[in-house]
Amino acid sequence: MLKLPVNTRPTIIAEMATQIVPSALLLFDGLKIAYAQKANLENQSESEDEEEEDDDLSDPEDLEDDEDHIAATIEDIEEDNLSDAETESAEDEYEQTALESYTTPLDNEDCDIDEYDEFKGVLDVIQQSDPNWYNVLMSPLNAQQQKSLKDVFTLAQQRRAAAESRKIEKSGGYMFANPAVPTSFNFGGKPIG
């Protein structure tokens, strides 16, 4: 709707123009927090998996006597009980509603569409094709919102570069035109002659 020409733009869009970009920035702030929480949960689950692997590596038969074996077993039971309590509190803390657990194609790692890049692209097109509309959209931004917009643009560029890097990695890496390796090197700074 933002990219619609002036004569086809609904009146309500023009009336709400001063709220469009600030509202979008608010959504991006929430999205940044959601991504951070998701990454934090993934890191926690990975570290818990590593801890479980480390616990599995200790073999009770390697213990010297029965007292060590009993002490180790009691510690394992206490750790398991603690883990269950921690898991329950984490589940209570991050209990999701049906809407929060709803996934979209944007949630897939290999999605070709990036919400940050799309937003930046739309605003770039508007700036070039309809500068007056762009000014109407940007005029209500305060200093903090302008900084947030700059952060969204920076993140868009970083995410685009990361996506391109993943595509190159999936395709087998970089291909160099001249794979020939020099047979001699001169580290002295004088030309070989």
Image (cartoon, rainbow, N blue to C red):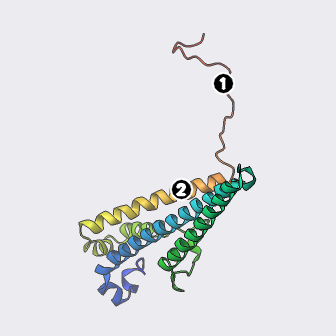
Along the viewing direction, whichever of 177 and 182 lies nearer the viewer:
182
Residue linked to disc 2: 162
Under circle 2, the secondary element is helix
Apparent side of residue 70 relative to residue 137 in the rendered image (left or right):
right
- Single out the residue that lies furthest toward the top: 193
Under circle 1, the secondary element is loop
Residue at position x 49%, y 64% from top? Answer: 40
The mark nearer the N terminus, 1 or 2, is 2
Residue 61 lies, with reference to residue 143, above or below; the image says above
- Single out the residue that lies furthest toward the right: 61
Residue 5 lies, with reference to residue 10, above or below; the image says above
Q: Please tell me how crowded label 1 is: few (under 14), some (14-19), or many (20+) other residues with Cα within 10 Å.
A: few
Residue at position x 40%, y 62% from top? Answer: 153
- Residue 38's spot in the image, x, y percent? 51, 68
How far apart marks 1 and 2 lie (CA) works out to 32 Å
Residue linked to disc 1: 182
Along the viewing direction, whichever of 87 and 45 lies nearer the viewer:
87
Q: Quadrant of residue 33?
A: bottom left
Q: Quadrant of residue 181?
A: top right
Q: Please tell me how crowded label 2 is: few (under 14), some (14-19), or many (20+) other residues with Cα within 10 Å.
A: few
Q: Nearer the viewer, mark 1 or mark 2?
A: 2
Of the 4 image quadrants, the one containing the C terminus is top right
Q: Amino acid at mark 1?
A: Pro
Residue at position x 40%, y 78% from top? Answer: 2
Residue at position x 37%, y 61% from top? Answer: 151
